[in-house]
Image: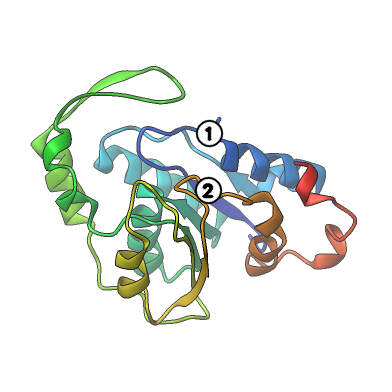
Amino acid sequence: MSGSILYIHGFNSAPSSKKATQLMKVMDRLGLSDQLRVPALHHHPREAIGQLEQAIAELGRPLLVGSSLGGYYATHLAERHGLKALLVNPAVSPHRMFDGYLGTQKNLYTDEAWELTHDHVTALAELEVPAPQDPQRCQVWLQTGDETLDYRLAQQYYRTCALRIQAGGDHSFQGFAAQLPAMLSFAGIGADLYQTIDFTAL
């Protein structure tokens, strides 16, 4: 489906996160809600990838928009299916970062408690793919003030992609709504549909 978007939230996040909510609002105003999927992902990577594969099958060839850990998932799926991806402060090799995090976790939005195990880490490692090489197919949006992930890791890993690096900001990506026209354009949605929308008011 041309102009469709699959939004992939991050670690311990949910469809009620700010970025996901802003994107849902815009697609709703454009009358394109049926071309957007924002699945509530299972905490286990294998389950999450299964959910995302199903969403891709429903949408056809969506733009994959991944935030943080969702960026890692999006990279894997984009390379597997030859899809376009837009990565927002993406995690690089997240399985190498989880050593100190094993044990009980809590979803920041749903309050669901769950156990992060070695099997989660192994499953994440299985998803690693070589970095995308095509700047026409992969955009990476980074903010240098990201307090959770060192933006330089993504800058280096995705160096052949189309990089947008903003000074300051944070891990949630400040000013995301104002960047949505660029995302819609990348997804193949015509500017004539949204040029009257005030994105800063979202």
> How busy is the neighbourhood of tag 1: few (under 14 within 10 Å), some, or many (20 plus)?
many
The percent coordinates of residue 21 (x first, y second) are 63, 37
Q: Is residue 81 shown above or below 160?
A: above
What residue lies at 86% left-to-right and 61% top-to-bottom?
A: 195
Q: Is residue 197 shown above or below 116?
A: below
What residue lies at 85% left-to-right and 52% top-to-bottom?
A: 197
In terms of secondary structure, where does tag 2 sit? strand
The percent coordinates of residue 76 (x first, y second) are 32, 61
Residue bearing mark 1: 15
> Gap in Å between the C-alphas at discs 2 and 1?
9 Å
Choose between 52 and 13: the one closer to the eye. 13
Q: Quadrant of residue 43?
A: top left
What residue lies at 90% left-to-right and 56% top-to-bottom?
A: 196
Q: Inspect this view and state whether residue 158 appears.
A: yes
Residue bearing mark 2: 7
- Tag 1: residue type? Pro
In terms of secondary structure, where does tag 1 sit? loop
Q: Quadrant of residue 166?
A: bottom right
- Tag 2: residue type? Tyr
The percent coordinates of residue 176 (x first, y second) are 62, 51
The quadrant of the image that shows the N terminus is bottom right
Tag 2–tag 1 contact (CB < 8 Å): yes
Whichever of labels 2 and 1 marks the residue nearer the N terminus, that label is: 2
The percent coordinates of residue 71 (x first, y second) are 40, 55
